[in-house]
Structures are given as structure tokens and as C-alpha cells.
Image (cartoon, rainbow, N blue to C red):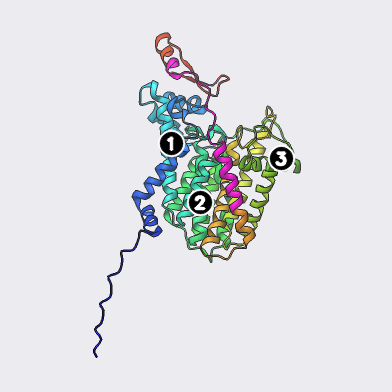
Amino acid sequence: MIRSEVPPRPARAAPARAGSWRAACESWPGSLALALSFTLAYAAKRPSQLLVPQLFAEDGTVFVTDALTRGWRDLFNTRVGYLELFPRIGSHLVVSVDMRYWPLVANALALAATGALFLYAMRRSLPLSERVGQAALICLVPFGPPIYLNMTYFVVVPLLFYPLMVRDIERTRRVAGAHYVFLAVVVATGPWGLFTAPVAIALWLARAQVKGAVAFAAAHALAFGVSLVAWWSSAPIPARVIAPPSLGTAGGLASDVARDLFALRGESGGSLSAVSAVGAMCVIVCVFRAARHRPPLLLASLVAGVAVLAGGVWRTLAISTASVLPQPWGAGERYFVLLLSTIGMILVAVLSDAVRERPIPIAATTAAVLALALIASNGVVNYSRPGLPDFDWPREVERSRTEGRKELRIPPGGGWTIKLP
């Protein structure tokens, strides 16, 4: 008896899987959508900068004033070690519109530049979970309110993304052209090239493991030289000579960092809370795990973050009027940015390695999960940043036009003004 073969059933249509969603996110439209989402989330930290826009501090007293009085000659003018190309170029765009809209244009430019950095992050070769995780932390960590949406403090925003670039090199073991572009942005916005020497040294030591490491280490050395020249040509002599910070000072700063990340408090000093202590221990476990990565470039970025903080402490204490140390949630928050963003990237990287391919001890995995959960909880609770004092910019403009006033008040107050020519 001849058996008839039963024709095979047609294969069912495969259900939509996570792979298709990931592929959509990897595309340019998907990257743009993610970057836009994170940019809006970042702007929502302090929406008053768009809803009730005002110029902030040096936005008016330096950049807009120089654009009005000096023209494009101010482009490469250094100030206290900062090149500040972005706010100087932006200020010329600002003064090209009606004076009533100066704050809105200035803050919109800062937001657009931040959006470009989020797009840069979404286009890296890292796993999507690492890019999205670090972008979420950038939006969640409650830095001081001046960080958000103004031209002056945009100088530190690239430092939020610097660890992500370092992680991209660490994981892919190659340097791409986009990394050079990003390094140029970092150098053009502040004296941060002075503090990236640990990354340059790590790249040199990893030259046999990372393609293009020698050239990128040389680029970091060039960035150091450019920043040194900018600092030397513009930095004032410290008002007084001080001793190096003591161990007690270092311990106080460590406590402030833990409090900012895990249990934000409005006051400085005091003992760590239980939550902060647990979070700090989790970070230490993950840092030791990250140090085992080869090459350990994120560890070098962490050292660079400590160097920035040390430089900020020195600069603060060198001013005779300084009475308190910098704080991550205000009055010096720019010095904590690279340290906190690198800690976040280390936590995300440890968890990503545990999930994907590397055998990670359960203790390190648990520590990463717990620390990220504490940061996320703290970030949600302290999501909104205080708005700036409202000096009623439209009214200031009207007074200038009707009464001939040449000085317009701007935040943060205390004599900060724009002097019109």
C-alpha cells in the first residue's frame, strides 16, 4: 500500500518580536523619535525656561552684551578658562531677533543642542538598552536647576554624554570619527579637556586592544593643550593660596554625591541616610566590577570625574568669598556632572553585561539593579527643578523702550543685568 505524503502545513506568520521593535529603534526615524522623547523629558525638568523664558546670568551679562558691543570679534574670546563657542555663536542668533524674544531663542538653542546630543547617543553602536538607560539617567538625576536649558550652563551638558562615548569605545574596541567630533564639542564648551587625561592614558595603555586608540589618545592630549592655553590666557590669579582639601572634605563630598543620587536632601553635611549608604555600597561593588573590564575605560572616565570635582573644589576655595563647598544640587553642580554621569553609565554597563554575554557575579548584578532602582526612584520624586526668579522680561523690555533704560534685570538676581549699548 502506497502511503500518500501529506503536504506540510504552511508556516504560520511569525508574531512580531522584540527584534522588529529593536530594528525600528535602530533606524534613523526611530533614533530621532527616541532623541526627541528624551529631549522633551529633559526640558520638562524645568519647563519655565520655555513657558516663561528668561536669560540666565552670563547669558546676558557676558554673551549677549558682547554680541551687542563687540560683534563677531568675541567668538574666540576665552573667559575663566572657557572657550564657550556655543553661547557666543548662539548669542549672535539671539540678538538678531526682537529683544522681547531673546530669552526664548537662547533657551530654545540650548534645548536644540541638547537634543542633538541625545541623537548622537541614540546612534552609537552600544546595545539599545545601554543607550536608553543612560539617556534616562541623564533625565532623572536631579542636578541643580541652572544645568537645564540655558546657553551658559550648556558647557557642562556634553559631560553628561561623555561616559556614553567612552563606553562605546570600551565595548566596540574601536574609535570612530563621531568620537572625534564629540571630543571637539567637549573642548569647545569648557575647560574639561584639562581633566580627561586619565582617559587618554587608558587609551594609550589599551592601544593593542582598541583600534585607533593611539590617535584618539593624541586627540585627548591636544584637547588638554587647547584647554590649558584657554585657561592660562584667561584664568585670574586665585585670591589666596589654600591647602589641598582634607580627607574630611573628601568624605563630605562623597556623602553629598550619595545623597544627590539616592536620597536628595536640601542641606549639606550630616551622616548618610540608610538609603544613601546602601546605594553607595552598590556603586562601589559595580565600580570594582567595571575595573575588571578590559580595557577599563569607564574607570578612567570615573577618575576624570573625580579630577573635575577636585578642580572645582580648588577653584571654589581659591575664591576668598567662598564659604561653602560646591553642592551637586546647586552652587557648583557643574563640577559633579561627569562623576555622576559616569557612575550611572557604570551601573548600566554592569547590568547590560550581566544580561547579555558576560558572566557577572550575582552580587554585582544585584548591586546594579538596586542602585539603578534607587536612582530612578529618587529621580522621579525630585524630577522637577525649581524655576528661576521671575523678573518679568517683557516688562523689562517695555521699560527699556519707553523709559530709555539701558540695564535690564535678569536671574539669578543680586545685580545681574544686561547692559545695552
Residue 393 magenta: yes
Q: Secondary structure at mark 2?
A: helix
* Residue 209 percent across, percent down from the top left: 53, 65
Q: Earlier in the sequence, mark 2 or mark 3?
A: 2
Left or right for 353, reference 124: right
Where in the figure is residue 323, as x and y percent of width and height?
A: 70, 29
Amino acid type of the residue tagged 1 in the rendering: Leu
At horizontal 25% and vertical 86% (from top left) the residue drawn is 3
Residue matched to label 1: 111
Q: Is residue 70 something one can see in this rendering? A: no
- Label number found at residue 252: 3
Q: Is residue 199 visible?
A: yes
CA–CA distance between discs 2 and 3?
27 Å
Dominant SS of magenta comes to helix
Asked if residue 200 lies left or right of residue 94, the reply is: right
- Report whether 11 appears left or right of 215: left
Taking the view exactly as shown, the residue that stands out farthest to the bottom is: 1
Q: Which residue is the site of mark 2?
A: 164
**Label 3 crowding class (10 Å Cα cut-off): few <14, some 14-19, many 20+?**
some
Q: Earlier in the sequence, mark 1 or mark 3?
A: 1
Span highlighted in magenta in the image: 369-396
Pick out the residue farthest to the front: 1
Vertical order, 311 against 50 (above or below): below
* 262 falls in the magenta region: no
Q: 190 or 104: which is nearer to us?
A: 104
- Residue 92 is drawn in which quadrant? top left
Amino acid carrying mark 3 in the image:
Gly
Indicate the quadrant containing the C terminus: top left, top right, bottom left or bottom right. Answer: top left
Q: In the rendering, at what x and y percent does residue 231 appear?
A: 57, 39
